[in-house]
Structure formats: C-alpha cells, structure tokens
Amino acid sequence: MERIKVFVVEDEPVKKANIIDILSNVEYIVLEGNAGSAEEALNMIEQVNPHVMLIGASIPGDGYKLAEQVFTSFPWISMIMIESELREDTMRKAIFAGAKDVLIFPFTPAILVDSIYRSYQMEKKKQVIQRDKTPALRKKSRQGQVIPVFSTKGGVGKTFISTNLAVSLAQHTGEKVVLIDLDLDFGNAALALNLIPRYTINDVVNEIRNLDQELMESYLIPHRSGIKVLAANAKPQMTEFINEEHTGLIIKVLQSAYDYVVVDMPARFYSAVDPAFQEADLLMLVTTQDLATIRNIKACLTSLNSLKYPRHKIKLLLNKAEKRSDIKPRDVETTLNHSIFATIPAEYKLVSSSLNKGIPVVLLYHRAAVSRSFQGLVRRIAGDAREAPNKKKSRFKLPGKAAYYDQVEVPE
Ligand SMILES: Nc1ncnc2c1ncn2[C@@H]1O[C@H](COP(=O)(O)OP(=O)(O)O)[C@@H](O)[C@H]1O
Ligand SMILES: [Mg+2]
C-alpha cells in the first residue's frame, strides 16, 4: 500500500509533539513535513505534496483561512482541522473551508489515525470516480492525429472543411474527435456548427498554468454529432495574449485524449499557430480551381518547402470543384507539382442551406456528392493512419517574425 503523506500545521508545542508522536508509530503514515503558521505552510505545501493536512484551528494566520486557500488551490489534499473544543460555529467554518473532519484535542491515537485513513480513502475514491466518469481521461495507447486545415487564401473553405471533416471522422470511425478553432482573428467554426460557446480558447489560456485533461474537457463545447469543439474567442483583440506555448500545450493535452484533433486554421502563418504545423500528421492544404487561388497556393507551397516542411505531410484538397471549369484538376496538379489528395465538389445550394440551418452538410444531406466526398476523405485519412502507426515528428519550425513575413509574401 502507498504510504499516506501527512503535513502537520500546528504551533502549540505540546499538541504538535503529541501528534508527531502518534504518527511516527503508524507504519503506513509518513510525516512529510510540519509548519507552525499558515504562511509557513503555504510556502512549504508544494514541496511537501501531502495527501492529508492536519491544521490547528488557532495557528498564526488562522487555520480556517489556510484551509480555504488549500481547498481552492490544492483540492486533492484532504484536510483535518484540530480544535480545542466542540462548537457549532467552528464546525460550520470547517465544513465551509472544505475540511473532511474536525478533531478535538486531546484525542486518542486511534481517533487520529482513523480520521487520517478515512479522509485519504475518501479522496482516493473520488479520484477513481472522476476518472471513470470522464471518458476523455482514459489513457490512450497512441497519440491522436493532428490535422490542421490550412490555406493562405481566405474563403476557400477551411472552416467548411474542418467542421465537416471533424463530424465525418466521428461518424465513420467511431473514434473521439475534437475540433480546435485556431483562426484566432475570425474564428467562426462554432457558428458554423450552430454552437454558442460558453467558453473559448481564451478561458483555457487564462487557466494555462493549471491545464490538464480534466480542466481542458470542461472548456470544450459538445456538438450533437459527438465531436467536441474548442471555440475561438469572440473578442479577437484578446488573441495577442495567445502564444505558441499556449497553443502547443493545448494541442498536446487534446492529443492525449482524442483520436483526431482537427484544426481550423487562419489564412496566414504566425507564431501562435506554429505548433499546429509542427504537430501535424497531415496538413490539409485547401485550394480552389481559380487562377488567383492556385497562384497563392503555389507561393504557399514554395514557402513551406523553403521552411523544410515535410512534403509527404502536405495533402492537397481541391474544394469547390466544378466539372465545367476551364482549369481541370490535372492542371492544378501540374501547376502546383503536387497530387490532389481529395476533391470536394461545389454544391452552393446545399452548402448554403446547411449553413443557414447550422447543421453540417454531411449530416443534413449525407447522401449528396459533397458529403460522399468527405466519406472518401475520411477513408483515406483513417487508412493512412493504419499504414503509418509510428509516425515521426517533423522538426519543422517557423522562422522568426521578420523572416516569415518575407518568405510568405503571397499574391492575392
Ligand atoms: N464545396 C463547397 N461548395 C459550396 N460552397 C462552399 C464549399 N466550400 C465552402 N463553401 C462556402 O464558401 C464560403 C467560404 O468558406 P469558409 O469555410 O468560410 O472559408 P475559409 O474558412 O477558408 O475562409 C462559405 O460561404 C462556404 O459555405
Ligand atoms: Mg474560416
């Protein structure tokens, strides 16, 4: 059995000596530290990292205030208050401060040890229940695939593709899918899914120091298709506070809980979205069939190439494809010197009706050609994943700001 780590905070020498004496006789308890005041305790707490804290109610700095602080900052620590008399008002104070038990000094060794053991067990049980309740917290054997949907051209369908791709992946693979809206300036992925986000990436960044899977999960917005969405911030002026360390951590945390992490990208390179490129397994590069876009994507491919971005990860998507167009898919491939990974037809009526209803086209018109093209795309992605289980991470890194503006100057 794991030994229970106990931290004693008491200033009265007699009480303290008595407690320490009792604890030193119990094999499965280890006294990890002791302090004489609230302030001293707070300074030591992270290092001591106890399971259980014994807190004298009348220590300098107030035992109840200390308990409240511990409860909000270290909620996994079980607290037992030590009082000198039994009073209703102090009992209530203890309960509101988040303590698990109140002991009246002097007590017998059996009472103290029993209280420590029970509070420790209660906390353990709570952790097990929480873990089982949140499927996202299940450990996965492999990291989720990161799939940014990118283009240096606006309006080509990045948001359309990332939302529909995420929903299709969930539907056809049955695996866990999360969509991150990293178009920090104009993010509208939540809107496309008819979701009104209660939380956005901004809330996550505000809590970045405490970020773990559980907290992350609480900021995701569930969509009825089964996917989860991390929405972009409604106030773009806040986005300057989001940097690559934030996005890198967010992607890592999501990758360990989800099978697919689809990312709706902005129409430009900048450092805050760099981690999406770095962590990408497949970079979906969206083009359309018109000349202006093709020239733009040509420049984008040249930039990616000069940045040594692994070419095999770049998957070209031809969106809004039309048979009648003068420029044929073959011409697109020749001009860009890159083969087309998937083609998504233009279906203006269906797509706009789906947008108006706020229901992804793959759900609303699942048998339409445009929806079937997403099914094909999903098969290719899922197939590729099986072929390459031991993916190698790219060492690609965007250069500093000055450099990338030069390199990623693209024609409109
Ligand atoms: N295959 C398609 N057929 C018809 N309309 C499309 C298609 N793909 C995208 N659109 C429409 O084009 C517009 C721009 O798409 P959007 O996804 O917002 O582009 P981006 O995110 O790249 O700026 C939207 O109105 C969208 O509905
Ligand atoms: Mg968009």
Image (cartoon, rainbow, N blue to C red):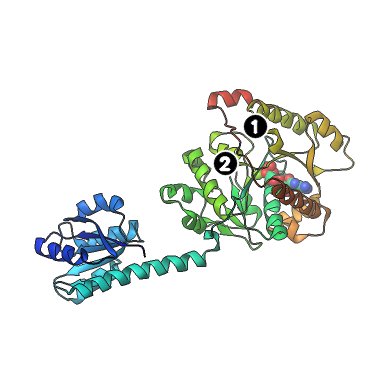
What is the C-alpha distance between the residues marked 1 and 2? 25 Å
Is residue 319 visible to the viewer in this orientation of the structure? no
Q: Pointers 1 and 2 in contact (CB under 8 A)?
A: no
Q: Quadrant of the N terminus?
A: bottom left
Which quadrant of the view contains residue 151?
Answer: top right
**Percent coordinates x, y for residue 359 in the rendering:** 70, 59
Q: Quadrant of ligand 2?
A: top right
Instruction: State the residue at coordinates (47%, 56%).
Output: 215
Q: Which mark is residue 185?
A: 2
Disc 2 secondary structure class: loop
Q: Position of residue 163 (x, y in %)?
A: 67, 52
Q: Secondary structure at mark 1?
A: loop
Please tell me how crowded label 1 is: few (under 14), some (14-19), or many (20+) other residues with Cα within 10 Å: many
Residue at (70%, 30%) from the top-left corner? 301
Which amino acid type is marked by label 1? Answer: Tyr
Q: Residue at x 46, y 66 (%)?
A: 130
- In terms of image quadrants, where is residue 69? bottom left
Q: Residue furthest left?
A: 14
**Residue placed under numbered mark 1 in the picture:** 309
Q: Is residue 108 at least partly visible in the picture?
A: yes
Whether residue 335 is situated above or below residue 46 in the rendered picture: above
